[in-house]
Amino acid sequence: MIKHFALAVAGIFCVAGSAQAHITLEQTEAVSGKAYKAVLRVGHGCEGKATIRIRVKIPEGLLSAKPMPKAGWTLQKILGTYEKSYDLYGKQVKEGLTEIVWQGGSLVDDEYDEFVFRATVAKELTAATRIYVPVVQECAEGAVERWIDIPAAGKTSDDYETPAPFFDVVAPPHS
Ligand SMILES: [Cu+2]
């Protein structure tokens, strides 16, 4: 009984600080007002179980998000209204994808894969803003990992077991 419990606890989270094993974004900087290609890196399943569904919350300020189709997976695109209206190449936009879901595939725990979408970083998002992209990873047998932790003041993502992937907005080179 005790042994079983210990194994279960050890299996819940990755070792703290092993960012490589979490779900993270490949490009940790995005230029304000420009397109950003978000590559979500999935380093493992949930407690050893295969990943069967990836749900991504598109954060406020990432406009006109478009997922990259992925062989073996079907896409679900959830349209929503932004909290604010944004100027996108002279046009006001206030709606777009607010969630993207890849499902129907199976990524076993000892293999690696990437899930990609592209979006425009609103120019209203100024340099030095950190943007979090919450992801829910669903696995076989109902297992789930919620990569949704956004650090409280005075903390960093490293302080959390399941940090949300993030990137930092940087200023355009010549503006
Ligand atoms: Cu991990």
Image (cartoon, grey):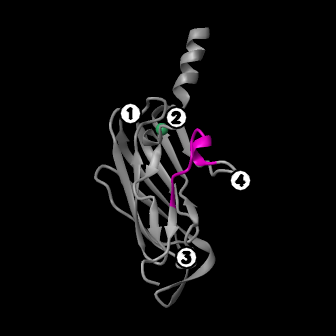
Judge whether residue 18 is colored magenta: no
The answer to the question of whether label 4 and label 3 lie on touching residues, with beta carbons closer than 8 A, is: no
Give SS at disc 2: loop
Please provide percent x and percent y for residue 49: 43, 31
Q: Quadrant of the N terminus?
A: top right
Q: On residue 95, which mark appears?
A: 3
Please provide percent x and percent y for residue 137: 49, 44
Type of the residue with mark 2: Ala
**Rendered position, 73 above or below 119:** above
Q: On residue 153, which mark appears?
A: 4
Quadrant of the rendered image containing residue 130: bottom right
Judge whether residue 164 is colored magenta: yes
Q: Is residue 1 visible?
A: no
Type of the residue with mark 1: Asp
**Rendered position, 52 above or below 117:** above
Task: Give the mark nearest the N terminus, 4 or 3.
Answer: 3
Q: Is residue 157 visible?
A: yes
Type of the residue with mark 4: Ala
Q: Which residues are magenta?
A: 156-167
* Residue of label 1: 109
Please provide percent x and percent y for residue 162: 57, 42
Farthest-out residue, left: 71
The answer to the question of whether label 2 and label 4 lie on touching residues, with beta carbons closer than 8 A, is: no
Observer-nearest of 115 and 38: 38
* Residue of label 2: 143
Q: How dense is the environment of label 4, judged by Cα within 10 Å: few (below 14), some, or many (20 and up)?
A: few
Give SS at disc 3: strand
Label 3 CB less than 8 angstroms from ligand 1: no
